[in-house]
C-alpha cells in the first residue's frame, strides 16, 4: 500500500487495496479492487503483512472467494506499532478471487509508510 489507511476506513470487513503494484505478470491482480483473480488452476502461495498504528488492533483475513484461508491478529500498545504477517498455501481454481480484508476485530489506523509497509504478494507454486 502506498499510504496509511485511516481508522475511519480500516473498519471491519474492509478489503485492503494494495495500490502500489511492483510486479503483476499477467495482470491478475487488480489494484482498483484489491482482488487477485487466479489466471490458472493450481497451488498458490500468498503472503500478506500489515502494520498497526499505536493503540490499534486488527485481524486480517486471506479470502478465496467467500472462504477464509488464513487470519492474522495484532494488537499494538498505545506507544508502539506492530507488524504481523501471514502465509497461506492454497489450491485455487481459475477465476477464483483472492484478497485480504479486515475481520470483525478491527480498530485503528493501518500503517504503510517509511517505517513499515502493508503488503500482499502471491505466486503459483504448482
Image (cartoon, rainbow, N blue to C red):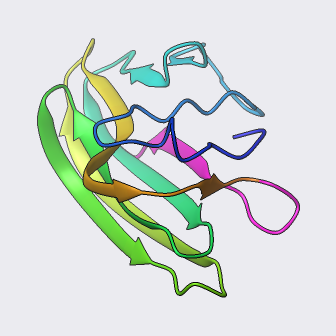
Residue 110 coordinates in the image, percent (x, y):
58, 54
The residue located at (19%, 25%) in the rendering is: 65
**Closest to the observer, 20 or 10:** 10
Left-right relation of 109 to 79: left
Q: Using the rendered view, name the quadrant where residue 31 is placed.
A: top right
Residue 30 coordinates in the image, percent (x, y):
54, 15
| Above or below, comparing residue 100 to residue 115 in the picture | above
Residue 109 coordinates in the image, percent (x, y):
58, 55
Q: List the single residue furthest toward the right.
A: 114
**Closest to the observer, 63 or 55:** 55
Q: Using the rendered view, name the quadrant where residue 115 is placed.
A: bottom right
| Above or below, comparing residue 117 to residue 42 in the picture | below
| Above or below, comparing residue 39 to residue 13 in the picture | above
**Closest to the observer, 122 or 71:** 71
User: In this picture, which residue range is highlighted in magenta?
Assistant: 113-126
Tell me the quadrant of the picture where the C terminus can be found.
Answer: top left
Residue 37 coordinates in the image, percent (x, y):
38, 17
The residue located at (51%, 16%) in the rendering is: 28
Asked if residue 82 lies in the magenta stretch, the reply is no
Asked if residue 117 lies in the magenta stretch, the reply is yes
Left-right relation of 51 to 96: right
**Closest to the observer, 73 or 46:** 73
Left-right relation of 66 to 28: left
The residue located at (61%, 49%) in the rendering is: 119
The residue located at (13%, 29%) in the rendering is: 66
Amino acid at each position: 500500500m502506498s499510504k496509511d489507511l485511516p481508522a475511519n476506513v480500516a473498519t471491519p470487513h474492509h478489503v485492503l487495496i494494495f495500490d502500489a503494484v511492483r510486479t503483476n505478470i499477467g495482470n491478475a491482480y487488480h489494484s482498483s479492487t484489491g482482488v487477485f483473480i487466479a489466471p490458472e488452476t493450481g497451488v498458490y502461495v500468498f503472503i500478506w503483512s500489515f502494520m498497526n498504528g499505536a493503540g490499534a488492533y486488527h485481524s486480517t483475513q486471506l479470502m478465496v472467494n467467500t472462504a477464509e484461508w488464513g487470519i492474522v491478529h495484532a494488537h499494538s500498545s498505545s506507544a508502539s506499532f506492530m507488524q504481523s504477517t501471514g502465509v497461506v498455501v492454497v489450491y485455487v481454481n481459475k477465476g477464483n478471487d483472492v484478497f485480504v480484508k479486515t475481520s470483525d476485530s478491527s480498530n485503528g489506523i493501518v500503517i504503510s509508510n517509511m517505517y513499515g509497509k502493508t503488503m500482499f504478494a502471491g505466486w503459483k507454486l504448482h
